[in-house]
Image (cartoon, grey):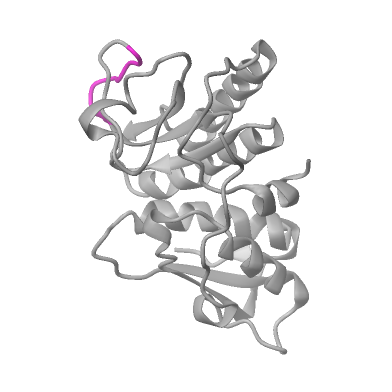
Amino acid sequence: MTLQEAIICRHSVRRYISRPLSPECIAALQEKIEECNRLGDLHMQLVVGEPRAFSGIMAYGKFSGVENYVVVASRKTPGSKERMGYYGEQIVLLAQTLGLNTCWAGLSYRQVNGAYTLAEGERVECMISLGYGETQGVQSKRKAIEEISNCSDLTPQWFRRGVEAARLAPTAINQQKFYFEYLPHHTNGKPTVRATRQFSLVGYTEMDLGIAKLHFEIGADKDNFEWEAK
């Protein structure tokens, strides 16, 4: 399965069967997490065979059977939440290619002492449930391309492909509070794209933007454009 195929197949899954992850899956996930932590200055951690985080009074949102998850943690630095989304979604898409199901969780969990470690100044921003779902999930309603971008007959096809991939990105309560703009000027000889987040009372828009930007890069092919400098 390619990453483009994983984007299409991935749906949020909250109910899991009790089936251990294979050593091969664990090794692949650990390797990717280590890479993403290094590139994103994060402290994501894979927790396997631990059923308490998504059980009990905090397990609202119809989660059940969660025994594996990724802890998304970091020091609070400029851009850290966007990086959490960008690199955390890399783990999500890898999991999909491995035949696993996932779901981002901002509140539907509790922290379990001893299941993972945090350095001084670090905090858990969210978790990603992980495992074999009872089902493959279903596609949630999505905004039209014109609502999340300036895509038109005048913009290139790679830009449309990027927006279509971003449109499938998971966001908090499916809010999709992001916008992609194809800009007329060039950077380093390439067209420029601006990605911005919009206001939301729910929050999580920085993380959502990071997730959507990764999807856009995969759909559009990063070689076709440059992000607008901040």
Q: Quadrant of the N terminus?
A: top right
- Which residue lies at the image location 40% right of the left edge and 51% below the top edge? 207
| Residue farthest toward the bottom in the current orientation of the protein | 153
Answer with the quarter of the image where residue 123 lies: top left
Tell whether 135 sits left or right of 75.
right
| Residue 190 seen by the camera | no
Q: What segment carries the magenta color?
A: 115-123
Q: Quadrant of the C terminus?
A: bottom left
Residue in the image at 45% along x and 21% along y: 67
Residue in view at x 36 percent, y 59 percent: 205
* Residue sitting nearer the eye, 134 or 193: 134
Above/below status of 88 relative to 144: above
Classify residue 14 by image quadrant: top left
Report which quarter residue 36 is drawn in: top right
Does 117 lie within the magenta span? Answer: yes
Residue 135 is situated, as x and y percent measured from the top left of the image, at: 59, 40
Left or right of 193: which side holds 103? left
Query: Is most of the magenta stretch helix, strand or loop?
Result: loop
Residues 173 and 63: in front is 63
Residue 13 location (% of width, % of height): 51, 41
Q: Is residue 153 above or below residue 54?
A: below
Q: Position of residue 98 (x, y in %)?
A: 69, 30
Magenta run includes residue 56: no
- Residue at figure coordinates x 30%, y 32% from the top left: 109
Tally the numbered discs.
0
Name the residue nearer the viewer: 3 or 210: 3
* Left or right: where 190 falls relative to 79: right
* Residue 170, percent from left and from top: 50, 54
Residue 154 against residue 40 in the figure, above or below: below
Residue 3 visible = yes
Asked if 66 appears above or below 51 in the picture, the reply is: below
